[in-house]
Image (cartoon, rainbow, N blue to C red):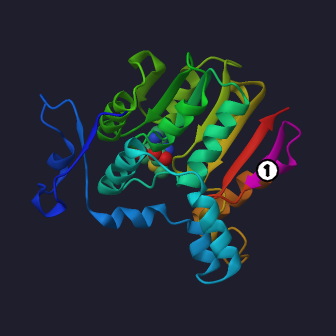
Amino acid sequence: MPRVESGVAARDRPRADSRLRPPRHASRLSVPTDPSHQSARRCPIATVAGSGNSTAQALQFAESYVTEDLVLRTARALAHEVGVDAVTPGAGAALRLLAAAGNARAVVEIGTGTGVSGVWLLRGMRPDGVLTTIDVEVEHQRIARRLFQEAGFASGRTRIITGRALDVLPRLADGAYDLVFVDAEATGFAACVDAALRLLRPGGVLALNGALAGGRIGDPAARDVETVTVRETIKAIRESEHWVPALLPVGHGLLAAVKG
Ligand SMILES: C[S@@+](CC[C@H](N)C(=O)[O-])C[C@H]1O[C@@H](n2cnc3c(N)ncnc32)[C@H](O)[C@@H]1O
């Protein structure tokens, strides 16, 4: 059982960053009880599809098909508190599936956040697998480190690197990884995909979160920078001879592609 406590009412919790920083002597995490984070669990695509229709209901059902335990709910609640948009349960379950299907031992994650996707990935990886996870925000990674610990993963199972993805990725070894998960700024997608092609072994898997650009991807009138960047990136992957892709309608859209 994970050692995660629930308890302190939201109104009693100090505001600002200090509320996320447990006392140094505290070995356990508190589960924030603010119910507003639950909105983050709704399927963004289902929201776009509209409520009450069968497509939205089916997508919502798919999102809740695999449920999250206390560790994941805690990581999600903390993500909400620090303003991180964590993967949805449906996307998390898909990541776990991809890691398990590939018997992944070495995984790179770009965008640690508070550890939601990291826990899902680790749960699909081999028991001796190592997750290398990169984020620019020390505070996010501090929370994620504690969550990985609370989830029962030995410290050797994670390599947590603070820095900008495009500065860190060149230091990682060619062809040494089974899965690369990209979940940071869309404007960096193309460079991350290039890096993934170098880092993955043949048969390794790229997973790109946010591939539906918040539902705007199919709207030709949507020409904002993020949507255009995502559109161009997923088109390039589809047309590349290096990838065998599929776009999964979970969460914000998870583009999965096997390196051929
Ligand atoms: C959407 S959140 C990641 C959520 C996480 N994957 C999860 O599901 O729990 C994006 C994260 O990427 C980080 N980030 C943004 N730009 C980055 C960059 N250029 N390099 C590394 N990390 C970056 C942010 O600090 C943030 O924590």
The residue located at (17%, 38%) in the rendering is: 22
Q: Is residue 216 visible?
A: no
Residue 108: x percent and y percent? 57, 29
Residue with the mark numbered 1 = 246
Which quadrant holds the C terminus?
top right
Given the current orientation, which residue lies at the most extreme front position? 1
Q: Observer-nearest residue: 148 or 196? A: 148
- In reply to whether residue 85 is colored magenta, the answer given is no
Rendering coords of residue 204 (x, y %): 74, 29
Q: Determine if the magenta segment contains residue 244.
A: yes
Q: Which residues are magenta?
A: 237-247
Q: Is residue 199 left or right of residue 112?
A: right
Q: Secondary structure at mark 1?
A: strand
Residue 225 visible in image? yes
Identify the image quadrant of residue 159.
top left
Name the residue furthest bottom.
Answer: 52
Q: Amino acid at mark 1?
A: Ala
Residue 134 located left or right of residue 247: left
Q: Residues within 10 Å of mark 1 (few under 14, many from 20)?
A: some
Q: Is mark 1 within 8 Å of ligand 1?
A: no
**Looking at the image, which residue is at 66% across and 82% down?**
53
Residue lying at 85% horizontally and 43% vertically, measured from the top left: 240
* In the depicted structure, whether residue 223 falls above or below residue 158: below
Tell which residue pokes out farthest to the right in this image: 241
**Image quadrant of residue 154?**
top left
Q: Position of residue 219 (x, y in %)?
A: 71, 76
Image spot of residue 189 (x, y percent): 62, 47
Q: Is residue 68 left or right of residue 229?
A: left
Question: Relative to the observer, which residue lies in front, 162 or 158?
Answer: 158
Q: Is residue 143 above or below residue 59?
A: above
